[in-house]
Amino acid sequence: MKNLNLQAVMIDLDGTLVDTIGDFEVALNRALADLQVPTANRALIERSIGKGSEHLIRTVLKHQLALPGVAGNAPELDQLFSPVWERYEHHYLSINGEFSNVFPGVMEGLEQIQTLGLPMACLTNKPISFTLPLIKDKGLAPYFSKVFGGDSFERKKPDPLPLLKTCEALQSLPARTLMIGDSSNDAQAADAAGCPVVLMTYGYNHGEPIQNTPALAWLDSLVQLQLNNS
């Protein structure tokens, strides 16, 4: 990878650093069961991840309420959203990290970035109340000088605002701040913010091949990130 003369690095969480699909599946399905809504399969949940918990819940609820035998016999989505969200938050906080694992190569990759002396921020659409305990539990917190969630700013990725605000916090120029993510959300936000972006191939990209999304590189492991920042 060419010398980007970087000042800092921003890294997404779900699907980039940690495989959290198990946490999403358990928490959301327990919430749905609490409200007598049919539970969802992992594939639906995985392709609905990335745009924040509100989007996840609304997308899955819409799908489940349209199932044969359910449509017309259940409350409307708007009526169910708040109670499902309340139960989802309860269950997620109770199992946060229990059904998730750090992806192979992540710790080694973070060590490599840290060796270059580049400050790092974790920037995710996950609520900050879910994010902070998770990165602490998984041993990731020491690598990040800043951590921002989906409710840290007025808008979420793919809007560029979270990236621009994170650059301000890191005191780095967007053009010299690398975004590392796993989805088109990360790439769209980075492009709009003027940040270079690298995408991981193993994450959650709404069921679409990540290689179809423009980026500097598509990596199978964070240890493959070769930065020459001298």
Image: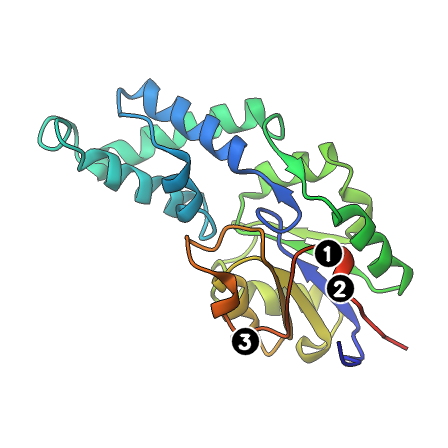
Rendering coords of residue 90 (x, y %): 48, 24
The residue mark sitting in front, 2 or 3, is: 2
Q: Residue at x 73, y 35 (%)?
A: 138
> Are circles 2 and 1 on residues that touch, CB within 8 Å?
yes
Asked whether residue 13 appears in the rendered view, the answer is: yes
Residue 26 relative to residue 116: left or right: left
Please name the residue that numbered disc 2 is placed on. Answer: 225
Mark 2 or mark 3: which comes first in sequence? 3
Please name the residue that numbered disc 1 is placed on. Answer: 222
Q: Is residue 19 above or below residue 11?
A: above
Looking at the rendered structure, the kind of residue marked 3 is Asp
Disc tally is 3
**Foreground: 106 or 116?**
106
Residue 204 relative to residue 166: left or right: left
Please name the residue that numbered disc 3 is placed on. Answer: 191
Looking at the rendered structure, the secondary structure element under dot 3 is helix
Q: Residue at x 74, y 73 (%)?
A: 172
